[in-house]
Image (cartoon, rainbow, N blue to C red):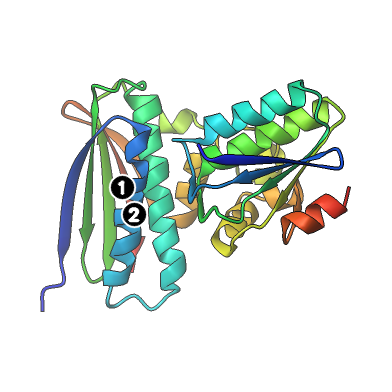
């Protein structure tokens, strides 16, 4: 899975550089987020601007990251949702759970 | 004029083929000449429900066995689109999968959204036993 990690003033930006976030690669994102929280990272932004397609497994990986963050007094935010990806968050009501920003810069500045 | 399309495709029971099947569903939306709704949304939805149905077959019915296979059949007529996803496994009880009647109560669950998504985007979703396995049938009126 193509993930790009950047550190920014103590915040971690995870860019998902895949067109699809689905059952074929979601587990890898889940593991990576879990690893980052175990390393002690507290503030993570997952940027989805390259993701055109997300399925229930992709949503599940992000929910896993969100729960992981919450249980460690950390925060996980999302940015860059394309319109159809955003519609999946709305269908499943997950847009009420996540803090979602237009782009990664806005998400990072919000910390 | 006959606008009937009938596609059958067989792939190994592996998630690496999800994009292949999903993209076929997405491309089909551009061939639905009579469809008057939002074609771009329909394309995405067909990609999504085929992906979800495949994952159900791969993980739950065929128990992740990479030697197994999944057969997908898509039939399109003027009025209706039917997608069948066949597995050769033990299957699962679709009734045992709780319907998230109000997704808010399930918000924070990691799993269990696949069937909800299929039911939300299609007009009907059924799962039943057939010779040698099971079939998940999704229908959408056009």
Q: Is residue B73 above or below residue A86?
A: above
Q: Is residue A95 above or below residue B41?
A: above
In this orientation, which residue lies closer to the viewer: A107 or B5? A107
Q: Give the alpha-carbon distance from disc 1 to disc 2, as whole Å.
A: 5 Å
Q: Residue at x 21, y 66 (%)?
A: B77
Q: Are marks 1 and 2 in contact (CB under 8 Å)?
A: yes
Q: Is residue A35 visible?
A: yes
Q: Residue at x 53, y 35 (%)?
A: A26
Residue carrying label 2 = B23
Where residue A7 sits in the image (x, y, percent)? 77, 40
Q: Is residue B111 visible?
A: no
| Chain for disc number 1 | B
Q: Quadrant where the C terminus of chain B lies?
A: bottom left
Residue carrying label 1 = B20
Q: Quadrant of residue A67?
A: top right
Q: Give residue B103's mark.
A: none
Mark 1 residue element: helix
Q: Quadrant of residue B98?
A: top right
Q: Is residue B115 left or right of residue B11?
A: right
């Amino acid at each position: 899975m193509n993930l790009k990690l950047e550190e920014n003033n103590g915040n971690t930006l995870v860019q998902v550089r895949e067109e699809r976030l689905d059952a074929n690669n979601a587990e890898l994102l889940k593991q990576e987020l879990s690893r980052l929280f175990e390393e002690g990272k507290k503030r993570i932004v997952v940027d989805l601007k390259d993701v055109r397609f997300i399925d229930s497994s992709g949503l599940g990986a992000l929910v896993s990251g969100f729960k992981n963050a919450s249980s460690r007094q950390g925060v996980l935010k999302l940015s860059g949702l394309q319109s159809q990806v955003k519609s999946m968050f709305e269908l499943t009501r997950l847009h009420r759970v996540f803090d979602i920003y237009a782009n990664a810069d806005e998400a990072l500045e919000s910390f | 004029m006959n606008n009937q399309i009938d596609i059958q495709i067989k792939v190994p029971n592996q998630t690496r083929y999800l994009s292949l099947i999903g993209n076929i569903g997405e491309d089909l939306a551009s061939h639905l000449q009579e469809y008057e709704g939002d074609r771009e949304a329909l394309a995405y939805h067909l990609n999504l429900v085929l992906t979800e149905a495949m994952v159900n077959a791969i993980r739950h019915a065929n128990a992740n066995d990479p030697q197994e296979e999944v057969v997908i059949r898509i039939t399109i007529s003027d009025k209706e689109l039917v997608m069948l996803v066949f597995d050769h496994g033990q299957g699962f009880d679709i009734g045992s999968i709780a319907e998230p009647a109000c997704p808010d109560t399930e918000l924070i669950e990691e799993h269990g959204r696949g069937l909800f998504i299929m039911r939300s985007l299609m007009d009907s979703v059924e799962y039943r036993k057939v010779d040698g396995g099971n079939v998940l049938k999704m229908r959408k009126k056009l």
